[in-house]
Amino acid sequence: MSKVFASHKIMLAWSLEIWYQTMNRIYIFTGKGGVGKTSVAAAHAIRSASQGHSTLLVSTDMAHNLGDLFEQSLGSEPVAIMKNLEAYEIDPNYILEHDFREMTECLMKMLPTSDGNSMEDYGMFPGMEELFSLLKISEIYKEGRYENIIVDCAPTGETLSLLKFPELLSWYMEKLFPIGRVAVRILAPISKQFYKVALPNKAAMTDIESMYLKLFELQELLKNRETTSVRLVATPEKMVVEETKRNYMYMNLYNFNVDGLYINRILPKEINNPFFEEWLKIQQKYITQLEESFASIPIYRIPWYDEELKGMRAVKRICEDSLTSKDVFEPVIVTKRESFEKNELGYSLMVSIPYAKKEELDVYQSESDVVIKLGNFKRNIPLPNVLRNYEIRNAKHEEGLLKLQFVKGEM
C-alpha cells in the first residue's frame, strides 16, 4: 500500500498545484477562549461578501455560536445570511453518516470493547470530530463555490488538535496499514476466529486508502502559504498575550502560516472615567508587548464597543472601524515551509519555531522520522528516502529557527 500511497502523492501534489493557481483562500481564526474570535471572523466574512466575493463562514467549534451571533437558525448545510455570504455550523456526526460510513463501521469492528459493546455505543472516536470538520472544509474548497472560506475555530488547544490531527493520523496510517490487500485477505479469517477482531474488508481498505490520500491532500491545503492563512485573535491581557505567543510558536512547529494578529476590545483613550485609568495603562502595556512580539505580521486593532456584538449591524461596526484596509485579505508569507537542503556535510532540515526556549526543545531521530518535542506537543517529520542512512549530527535553535544537520551514518 505504501507504493500506492507514494504514486498517488505525486499525482496529488501536481493536481494541488493546479488548484492553488485557480482557486481562492481559507482564513482560519484562532485564539484563547473568550477573546472574540467569532465576531472577528464574522466581520471578515461580511467584509468579504460586501466586496462582492462569494464567502462561506464556517464554525468548527462544537459549541457553535454563529447562529446566536446572527440571530438566525443554522442547520447541517450552509444557510444564506446576506448577499454573497453563507454560514455553516459543521455537524461531524452528519458528515460521518453521509460521507464515511463504510470506513467507520470497519474501524468500529476493529476496536471491540471488553464488556462486549462496540465503539459505536460510545460515540465518535476522540479527534474524529476535528478530522471530519477539516475534511468537509477541504471538500467545500475543492468544489470552488466560494472565493473566501472564513473558519471560526474553537479555543487555542482544540484548534491545535484540529490542525495537527490530519498529519498525526496520516503518520499512523502509514505505520499501521502497510500490509496491503493480500495480507488482509489471508489474515482476515484468522483474526476473526482467534482474536475476535475483524480486519478491514476490500471496500473498507479502499476507504482507508482514500482517507489517507484525503489526509495528504488536506495537509497540503492547510500548509500552503498561497492558499491558507491562520490568524490570531487576542486581547491586551497578560494571560492572553502569553497564550498567543505559545499559539504562534506551536502553529509554526506544525508548519502553518500565521499572517495576522487582531488585538480586540481596546478601551478608547479618550474615556473620561477615573475607574478606567489603571485599565488603560495595563492595556497599553500589553498592546506594546503584542506589537513588539508580532512586528513581522500585520496587526489590526479592534475597539471595545458600548454594546453586545450581536446581530448584523453590530458586527458591521468592526468592518467599519478596523477592516478598512484594502490589504486585509492579502496573504503575507511570514515564515518559509520546513525544508531539506543539501550542503557540504550532507543535508540540513530547517523548521521555524519562534519563541521556543532551548530547554523546552527535544529533538531525536526515530527510525525513518525526526521527532521534535516542544513542551507537551510532539511532531514526527518523515525523512525522505535519501536520508534513511543519515543521522543527526547536531541541532541548533537560533533566532526562531531550528536547524538540524544530517551526516551519512556508518553502513
Image (spheres, rainbow, N blue to C red):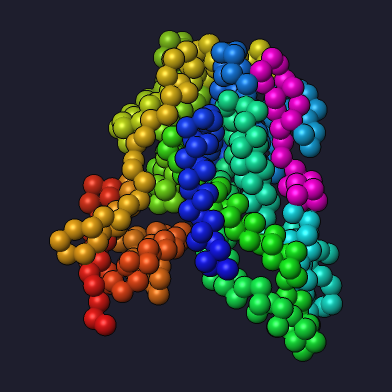
Q: Is residue 218 left or right of residue 358?
A: right
Image location (x, y in percent) of residue 95: 75, 46
Query: In percent of the image, x 54 and y 71: which residue is there?
Result: 175
Image location (x, y in percent) of residue 89: 72, 36
Question: What is the magenta range?
Answer: 78-99
Residue 259: in magenta span? no
The image quadrant that residue 285 belongs to is top left
Q: Is residue 253 left or right of residue 133?
A: left
* In the image, residue 22 above or below residue 92: above
Image quarter in which the C terminus is found: bottom left
Q: Residue furthest left?
A: 344
Please state the total of marks drawn on the protein image.
0
Query: In percent of the image, x 78 and y 30: which residue is there?
Result: 74
Seen from the viewer's position, the closer of residues 327 and 269 is 327
Query: In percent of the image, x 66 and y 18: which residue is there?
Result: 84
* In the image, residue 216 above or below residue 298: below
The image quadrant that residue 410 belongs to is bottom left
Image quarter in which the N terminus is found: bottom right
Image location (x, y in percent) of residue 277: 42, 20
Q: Is residue 14 left or right of residue 218?
A: left
Image location (x, y in percent) of residue 380: 44, 63
Seen from the viewer's position, the closer of residues 394 and 143 is 143
Seen from the viewer's position, the closer of residues 308 and 249 is 249
Query: In percent of the image, x 50 and y 61: which residue is there?
Result: 6
